[in-house]
Image (tube, rainbow, N blue to C red):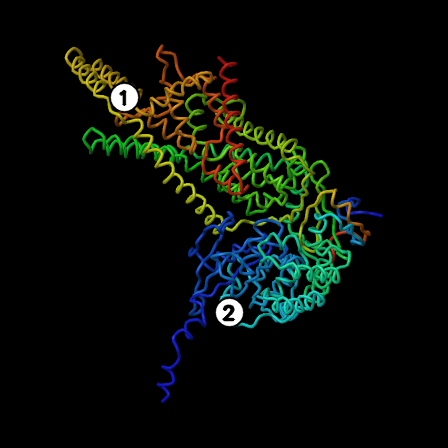
Amino acid sequence: MLTLCDLKPGERARIESIDTREPAVQRLMVLGLVEGAEMTFLRASLGGDPLEFRLYGAAISLRREQAQRFHVRKVGHGEPG
Amino acid sequence: MASRAETAIPIEALTVTRKAVATIAVVGNPNAGKSSVFNRLTGMRQKTANYPGVTVERRTGRATFGRLPLDLIDLPGTYSLTPNSTDELIAVNVLFGRVPGTPRPDAILAVIDATRLYQGLYLLQQLAELGLPMAVALTMSDAAERAGLKIDVQRLSERLGGVAVYPVVATTGRGFGALREALAKLVETPPPGPVNAWQELRSTAERLEERFARSGAKLHRAEIERLLVDEAGAGEGGAPPLADHLRAELAAARAALFGGEPPLAAEARRRYAWIRDTLAEVQSASSPLASRTAQLVDWINRPWPSTALFVLAMFIVFQAVFAWATYFQDWIDVGMSNLGTVVAGALPEGMLSSFLVDGVIAGVGSVIVFLPQILILFLFIIVMEDTGYLARAAFLVDRAMRTVGLSGQSVIPLLSSFACAVPSIMATRVIPQRRDRIATILAAPFMTCSARLPVYALLIAAFVPSRQVGVVNLQGLVLFGLYALGIAGGIGTALLLRRSALRGENPTFILTLPEFRVPNVRTVLMKLLDRVRVFLRRAGTVIFTVAVIVWALAYFPRSEEVEQRRLEETAAAEATLEGEALEAALTDIENRAAADHLAQSWLGRAGQFVAPAFAPLGWDWRVSAAVIAGFPAREVVVAVLGTIYAVGDEADEQSLASRLRAATWPDGSPVFTLPMVLGLLVFYAWCLQCAATLAVIRRETNSWRWPLFAWAYMTTLGYTGAMLIYQIGS
């Protein structure tokens, strides 16, 4: 299954399931990365990590290490309407 | 009869009903414009102090809305009531009334960014559970409009249990009239009705609240909700300790509520489900017009343009600190030296004159002269912070910082420590993991702080030729090199620590990146003023005190013998010479007398006592004495050098720099050779000469182990570096 690491810039995806064991992942959930939320991948930083996403108006950055805990389904391009 | 009944009311009954001034807590997400709202509401009537036991800033301000005065308290920004750092913990503890000396707030002003309502609503739901009157200031409402977001304020208010919502623009003041009116009546407003985001949690907490009350544990329902969701965090956060049987009940309730799901994850899932429903109801988006600015910002945020901007920004800062500041410095220099001449001319020669001119004016003056550099540096850092650029920098360098065992979040404290390590060590509180935090704290004092600049500036101006090398100035290049040396020292230390004493898994990195924002002039100026005030307070107290003590150490004891010889030699010269030859002879006599006085003063004796230890570094006893005097606060060194080289000689027009160039060993060879100066610069780059930094490390790590280690380690490193350079260079 795809994770947040597998998107190309501009692609939008919906979070389908989350491996919630890591405390850092739970922190991200408090910031709104929960099942059903839609995120647009904006870009990777220098060296391909961390990643920057748009989440309902906010820009959030996380490392690949945590991003791979979020399983997603692509739903389109650009920001959610 | 009526008046008799009135006088029968006991006076205590009247006074206990109301506190003199009600307190409103200003709460919000980080970067939601909370401080701008707070500043606009309170103006300059602010007080900054620390919360007891921690170094989190406690900002309060008095404001009068309508007739009533109100105290506003600006709490640290937080995304939820589940604290993840000391700052957030303070915000939560104040809201629950657990901080000694800070009363539980009577009402809440929530500051929520209209463009990030999704995350704002999470905090709002939790705040609504507190049972306090609440109002919402919806900031950035102009930016939301530009982004094509329409927010139905009425519907939003209904979803939040009737909390009044006020769209505002903090930069222009739009909407503040209505907000002020609401705040005037806020304390009397009923608390919000229940927000039906998570009924099970609320009813469980209500049931436990009753059970606990019967056992004598008075806990608010909202507090119990936090204990249910965040067992570890709420436990260490100063919630009152519970009896074992109550803890067992909590655990049972937790198991029934969450099953095997991590409580934090469960809370996030429930609340954000409600938030998505709410957003669908209250917010509608039309396709935003991608403005030219937005497109430009988007392009700049790409890795390579962003890197180029980072390097450019750093380079401009360093050139500005050195090049632009010199004009202002020259004015201050001339002004101080004129003041010294005037004072010296108005007073009879002797102790008082020496004290005022060489102790007070020379000491404080030589520190104030570097104020322009500090102003420029702080201005850059504050603007970078307020535009949101510092967070961008953290994102950019996270990968690189990880190679030394730190995270991008460390870059913000480390960059701030280019101004001063003290606030930067305080700023490490944003780093959640203790190991990363301590590694960052120990790396921070290596960064070239504003107090090192005076020493660098003096020595570079005196001993490095002002020559163009390509497009850059050689002096600027040496300064750049010293900054690089500090960075290398800090990074090396972090790396070493993360591989040894602070070994552990790699830090995580979660960061919300604020949108690019044109900084608010008012906010920038207020912050600048605040930091300059802090610097001047240090210059005015610590540096002044040390300058006077050092003057006294250098002035006393006064030798009759030296004085006698000076008078005899002067008389002899006047009898045999005249004109320019006499002038020259007199100057020479004065200088030698001054040097002799110093050599047998307390400071001179101390310098001579330790000089052998510093001989491998090429330092004479004067430099040794100045360095000793500078251990409590390194910025004092310039003042001390000024005092050492100016004592006993009045109204001298020579600058300190040329005095240093003229300093010689007894055999006539210059003391300040290039290898010695470079070594001295390296010593200053690496040595921890700052009592304030040690005190703040002690406070932030809560032990003497780390400050003592930092001091010993950095002093050894500075000494070794200076010795190697001197020995190899000579």
Q: Which residue is mark 1?
A: B597
Q: Which residue is mark 2?
A: B187
Q: Amino acid at mark 1?
A: His
In this rendering, is residue B325 above or below B18? above
Estimate how packed mark 2 is, as few (under 14), some (14 to 19) or many (20 or more) residues with alpha carbons within 10 Å: many
Which quadrant does the N terminus of chain B fall into? bottom left
Residue B174 x/y as whole percent: 52, 62
Estimate how packed mark 1 is, as few (under 14), some (14 to 19) or many (20 or more) residues with alpha carbons within 10 Å: many
Spot the residue most to the left: B575
Q: Alpha-carbon distance for marks 1 and 2?
A: 69 Å
A16 with respect to B475 (left or right): right
Residue B40 x/y as whole percent: 48, 58
| Subunit under mark 1 | B
Residue B439 x/y as whole percent: 60, 36
Count numbered badges in the picture.
2
Quarter of the image where one finds residue B159 = bottom right
